[in-house]
Amino acid sequence: MQFGLRVPPAPRLPSAGDVYTRLDQEQLTNILRLYFNQLSGNVQSIAGANGGQYIECPNGLFFNTADQTFPVANTDYPVEYNQTYLDNAVALQSGSTSRIEVSVGGIYNFQYSAQLESTNSSSKNFFLWIRRDGVDIGYSTRAYSISGSSTYRSLAYSFNIDMQAGQYLELVAAASDTSLEIAADTATSPHPGIPSSVMTVNYISPLPDVLPTPP
């Protein structure tokens, strides 16, 4: 870590002798004083200004440098990623390009952004929703419309959701027309490359005692 606190090891306390002496007491007190001073310094650093820099939380960032097409209209397809930028306790499930798995249970914030492209002039619809461990989350769908040939539309979807350790989440999409795609582009002067999809994931808080029931 660039910024970190030194976690003091548990002190090795001296064994008690058969005869109690003042020196024994002073030695024990000095060992404990040093240990608790280190702990107190850590607590003060965390509780002080900018203390959040010392707290490590699960997070991830995934994106796709390729187009994602929809070969069959009105058919669900998982949103895909082919690149990982951050993956601290949050990662693409082994062998998957769409399932984002967490190894620490908690409430997570997912922020997704994408670029839609229409390749013909007709009006078309795009639907996006949440699927957790293979189960669609009720009332999680977002609908978008786009029309015009070679036109673009950016979209964003941010939500919080409870995730248990080992669970995965994926976004699922469907298009009403095969001439709609989530489009990427390579770097072209003056701008860098454009990803088709970007997903950032951040840990928010521990799980509640009673898990919420999805709608």
Image (cartoon, grey):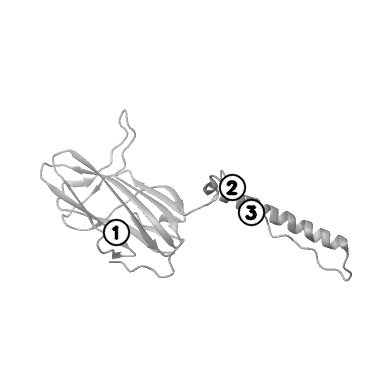
Which mark identifies residue 47? none
Tell me the residue that label 1 is attached to: 130
Q: CA distance from mark 2 to mark 1?
A: 36 Å
Q: Please report the residue visible at 31 percent of the width from the left and 65 percent of the height from the top.
A: 134
Residue 85 position within the rendered picture, expressed as x and y whole percent measured from the top left: 42, 46
Residue name at image x 52 percent, y 52 percent: 56
Q: CA distance from mark 1 to mark 3?
A: 39 Å
Sequence-first tag of 2 and 1: 2
Compare residues 80 and 171 and report the one nearer the observer. Answer: 171
* Secondary structure at numbered mark 2: loop
Q: Quadrant of the C terminus?
A: bottom left
Residue 76, image x, y percentages: 22, 58
- The residue where tag 3 is placed is 7
User: Mark 3 belongs to which amino acid?
Assistant: Val
Q: Indicate the secondary structure of the residue bearing disc 1.
A: strand
What amino acid is labelled 1 in the image? Ile
Q: Residues within 10 Å of mark 1 (few under 14, many from 20)?
A: many
Q: Residue at x 65, y 55 (%)?
A: 39
Residue 33, image quadrant:
bottom right
Quick one: SS at disc 3?
A: loop
Query: Mark 2 belongs to which amino acid?
Result: Gly
**Residue on which the image places disc 2:** 4
Quarter assignment of residue 137: bottom left
